[in-house]
Image (cartoon, coloured by chain):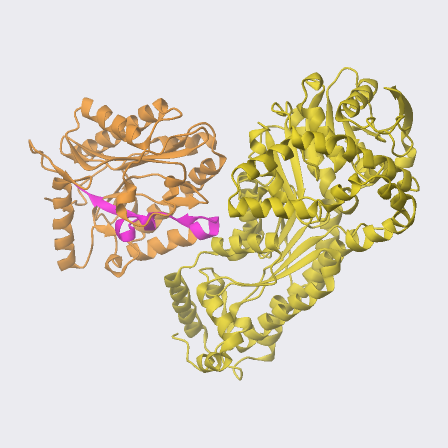
Chain colours: A orange, B yellow
Amino acid sequence: MTTAVTGGLSVDSAELRGFRQVQQLAYACAEAVAARLEPGITEREAARMQREWLRERGVRDWFHLPFAWFGDRTAFVNFRIPLQFFPTNRRLEPGMPFILDMAPVYDGYTADIGYSGSLGISPVQDRLMADLEAHRELILREVRERRPLREIYEDVDRLMVRQGYANRHRAYPFGVIAHKVDRVKERRWSPHVFGFGTQSLKGLASDALHGHRDGWSPLWSPYRFSDHPPQPGLWAVEPHLGFRGTGAKFEEILVVTDSRDPEQSAFWLDDDLPHVRRWAEEK
Amino acid sequence: MTVPVTLEEARERRVQTGGVELCVAELGDPGQPTVILVHGYPDSKEVWSEVAPRLAGRFHVVLYDVRGHGRSTAPKPLRGGFTLKKLTDDFLAVADAVSPDRPVHLVGHDWGSVQAWEFATVKRTEGRIASFTSMSGPSLDHFGHWINSRLKRPTPRRVGQLLGQGAKSWYVYALHTPVLPELAWRGPLGKTWPRILERMEKVPGSGYPTSSLPTDAAHGAWLYRDNVRARLRHPRQDAYAHAPVQLITPLGDAFLSERLYDELELWVPQLTRRTLPAKHWIPRSRPDQLASWITEFVTSVEGGRPEGVTATGKYADRFGGQLVLVTGAGSGIGRATAYAFAEAGARVVAVDRDVEAAVRTAEMSRLIGAPEAWPETVDVSDEQAMEKLAAKVAAEYGVVDVLVNNAGIGLSGSFFDTTPEDWKKVLDVNLWGVIHGCRLFGRQMAERGQGGHIVNTASAAAYQPSKALPAYSTSKAAVLMLSECLRAELAGQGIGVTAICPGLVNTNITSTAHFAGVDAEEEKRRQKKSARLYGLRNYPPEKVADAILRAVVRGEAVVPVTPEARGAYLMSRFTPRALRRIARLEPPL
């Protein structure tokens, strides 16, 4: 399990190409499945559609199994225990927002993505998605400034409050806005527990162990253990906004290196993603 | 809302039908959709004299005196001359005369609504009615089924409902006695009725009822005698409405229980419910609200409005289309309150001193259900600015139906550390802001005379003394008492006043609060610390907003919200000494 991503890791390295490829694959899956969603489909069915789509294209292991949230579940309304994240029999209705979230492992590379959409028009979610752009910019800027992750988390929080939204990534385990992802060894048998692939969990656990010794954590949370500058590596960043029963998020990989050049010290793995294209089109 | 014409300027015509001659009045452009207003008992078409002109700008408004009322002639003999069948003939004759080609929009009050239910549910009017707005008059057929279902399965609750309505219907039994009602109406009752209306029913005395009242009331008794017993005993099985119906229920109706409409969805496929806190004669006491609901409903049925966001909130029946002004709407409880009203379909004026925040609140309000929302930038402590705002709101948006004086700032520190400037600042915003709001917008409400509601955000600190918050608590205690006094003063005018005492709520009041007697750095630290504590408590402002809407609907006086606020409220009443002990504690900052 390697955590050392060095300054030598440039935008074009083969390693990043692998990650970029699987992230593209996952977003393609999200768009394909989103296009096939219709009234009456349940969250379970939507999750299965994602799983099958990716299996057909060679995905054998997962960081976590695909999730699907419909309606006010996109804002995690009344979520108390983590089991509530799992897909339910909630049916999709016209005008309902939805979020597809999946983390496939392909060829040893991990992606973790989140895709927000709605069946028909959801003006509130459109607005949330538009307002997420500022968060993407804020996160990159402050990571390049090497601000402690906890402070960046608080700044994201402040921006959300100013926009009038609730922080919904706080509902995730440990309240994380991001977590590290890494390469995963491919095994013939790759079981998962509670939806998370054991190989990936192992990686996360070993990161947590190393990080604990060196004073950093693979989980980017509001807590003290995240009070450290960004650790080089790949971070799946997932700001999640909620507004009165409607939620929206994106999730994609942020590459952090130990380069001195600010431009090279942190960058988004790929800018050719649905939400980024959308923001560009709206301008 | 401007009133362009009066009923006196209406064009009149006579319509012959089934041996009687009906007096029909028309207002507005006949090219517009036709709205026919049907009056009740004991009324004449003049009961609509406030509502009709308010509709005439947009619609072709038609009113007629029901047979035997006003200037229409009475059938001979009276007995058997007022059956619903004959009343339907009358309606069709009027509709054919005033709008031969297009279906009409019906509006009925009291007995006008009872007969309009018949029009809207019988086969032969199909295609002639585009929509029906019903107020204070159930279908006799639905009523019959309502009684039968309760007799067949008499659970305690249903028996209670039956007895409740049975008591409210005393006048129906009285009207079935022969001769006596006629004698009473033509004698003493006819003379004292206007005063009874004014005293008991809060109908503003402005030239109504008209001089025809004694004969209207005497003839109208046959409406009951000809129909009620027959229909209640054998209600029609097919009384399904063939047009969309808007049901407006006054909650203070002395004659009809709101429970009557519980199963109405069975009979009406497209039902819109509206409620309003008023007594029976809403065409007299709430003309603005009725005109706006009728306009909105007729316009939406005509398809004149683009498909917008629909209000989904819990209290949409109550706040739909109402004008709500919230101060301090840029954050925290104010913002959540503006959103809650927006979700209920209210038009929202979001006032804040932070332009960007106010704009944001207004924008999001429109997205979640407010038909209209406007940002206004005002510092509530600035008297002149508030006066300007009040004038602008009245001129451009109308009279405020619900006012939420919510803007407030925090100030902590011992009494001797609090400078006169600190005192002035906190009192200016927390107390004077509320005074200005109540003074300016409350006056507009009172002058309109059609009710309203004022909500003032006080605090649990208003009754929980504390050595850490002397100035803040003083300002909030003043707000609490001001609300109570104002409530007493405005009670007679149908304007409710509520003081909300939230308690520890997770808003940014902590990070903007001033801490007296410490340097800037220490102030920052304390702000952060208190924000953290409030964050740990994590009581969301949305729950306070829900409490505010509920308080307006129920007309509550003092509403402590969080459990600690409720606990302290109880202690202030029953164990004040314990509360004083708590006041001595040092806050953990």
User: Front-most of B561 and A23?
Assistant: B561
Residue B505 pos. (x, y %): 46, 61
Magenta run includes residue B128:
no
Magenta run includes residue A165:
yes
Which residue in the rendered view is the most extreme toward the front? B178
* Magenta residues (range): A160-183
Q: Is residue B585 above or below residue B532?
A: below
Residue A88 pos. (x, y %): 30, 36
Q: Is residue B453 left or right of residue B1?
A: left
Q: Is residue B254 above or below residue B461?
A: above
Residue B448 pos. (x, y %): 78, 51
Q: Is residue A65 left or right of residue B67?
A: left
Figure disc tally: 0
Q: Is residue B90 above or below residue A278?
A: above
Which image quadrant: the N terminus of chain A? top left
Residue B96 pos. (x, y %): 80, 17
User: Front-most of B103 and B469?
Assistant: B103
Residue B534 appears in view: yes
